Image (cartoon, rainbow, N blue to C red):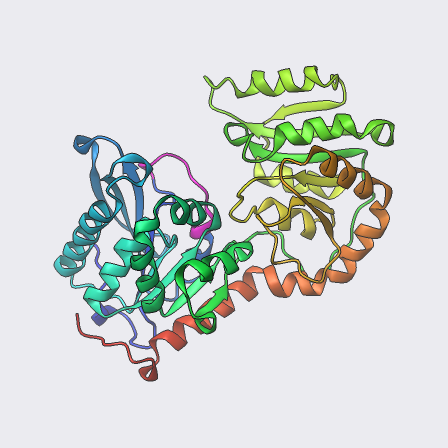
Amino acid sequence: MTSVTPASVSPRKPLILHISSDYPNPIRTPTTNAVERLVDRMTDHPQVVVSLQRVGRPWRTYWRDLGMVGGRRLIAHGYFALPLGVGMLLWQWRLARRIRRFLAAEGIVPDIVHSHRFTFEGIAAWMVACATGAALFQSVRGEVEQKVFRLKPTYRPLFRRMARDAARIFYVSAWYRAGFERHTGADPARTRLLPNIVLNARPEIEPDAPEPRIVVALRLDALDRKGLPDLIAAFAAAGPVLDGLWLDIVGDAPPDSPDRDRVQALIAAHGLEGRALLRGPVGHEAFLSELPRAMALAMPSRDETFGMVYPEALFSGVPILYAAGTGIDGYLDGLEVGIGVRPGDVTGIADGLVRLVRDNARYRAAIRAAAPTLFERLSPEGVVARYRAEVDAATAPTAGRRREA
């Protein structure tokens, strides 16, 4: 089995151990590729990825060393833990022990341990970093962290200690920065933004002439969290201003899911047959090729970690309707490229849709003017360059991290 050891790599390239429950592997159920996109762009560094999935039955656990995959050592691990975070500390201690045994057996000494969630596997990552002397990186994903902080108040002293020990804390969810620091006392000087990477970023944006359609893209099994019922109701409530436009719903669901029927029922209940179209799944490349011709993208989500479809729309020259205080909020400060609405506020969503349609030319011009700023904040090149700088800073001799295992 191929291994990664300090002797096989340049000492100037720190070894990064990524621990993530949102990293694709051939064994687990499908998940987002947001973390994978960052790892893909760091392959000049030695990297080990432990791709996690919680399993609900102890006899279904697995550990598969998949060797070198795409320039990184990939481990697929299904670990047992009770649902809803019951006994979270125990299960994460067991997870940390399993990872440490693997590292010891393979002679792998990480310079950085990066957990791509602060809670859950972030606890295991903290334990591994403490045991190995590695610098600890923690990513903050607002949807899950906010829920755990609210439901697990007895864990707050542990979370404060983890935040204190982290060399860097990365906000994927810029909107949760204040809430996270309130709960953990994290030092703002050691925090950074780390948006998810989108593939259509460009420094110059030339919006297309729009077609009369407002688009929303989602997995139908998350339709409530994505605010689709509110959006359908708002589209109907907007009245004659939106006559001649249609709502283009791009989404997929498992074959046995009732969600397709539910969406069709919502469309019928609001009298939108012929004006709201459930298209089903569309490939990502096809979706991006169609997106520039949309009048607007609308997704008034609840507790959205980031929402990669928002910057995809902006880099396509399309203004967005998004939920304030969640999703991409916090990355668009000072830019008038969309409208933030309160989740669940059908009247406010309807008003936002009307404004995006009436002032569409102005919003598209604002996106064109904001292109350099959007690119600086959200481009893969900028995201990776800033991440590399933090890797170098955290592993510099002056950083004070011990190197022995």
The answer to whether one can see residue 49 in this image is no
Above or below — where is 112 with respect to 325?
below
Does the magenta run of residues contain 30? yes
Magenta stretch encompasses residue 295: no
| Rendering quarter of residue 78 | top left
Residue 380: image location, x then y, percent: 55, 60
Left or right of 378? Residue 398 is left
For this view, does 160 lie left or right of residue 35? left
Measured as percent of width and height from the top left, residue 244 is found at 85, 27
Question: Relative to 189, is 127 above or below?
Answer: above
Residue at 21% over, 43% down: 63
**Residue 205 lies in what quarter of the image?**
bottom right
Left or right side of 130 for 49: right
Left or right of 305 on screen, residue 334? right
- Residue segment shown in magenta: 26-36
The residue nearer to you, when weighing 297 against 109, is 297
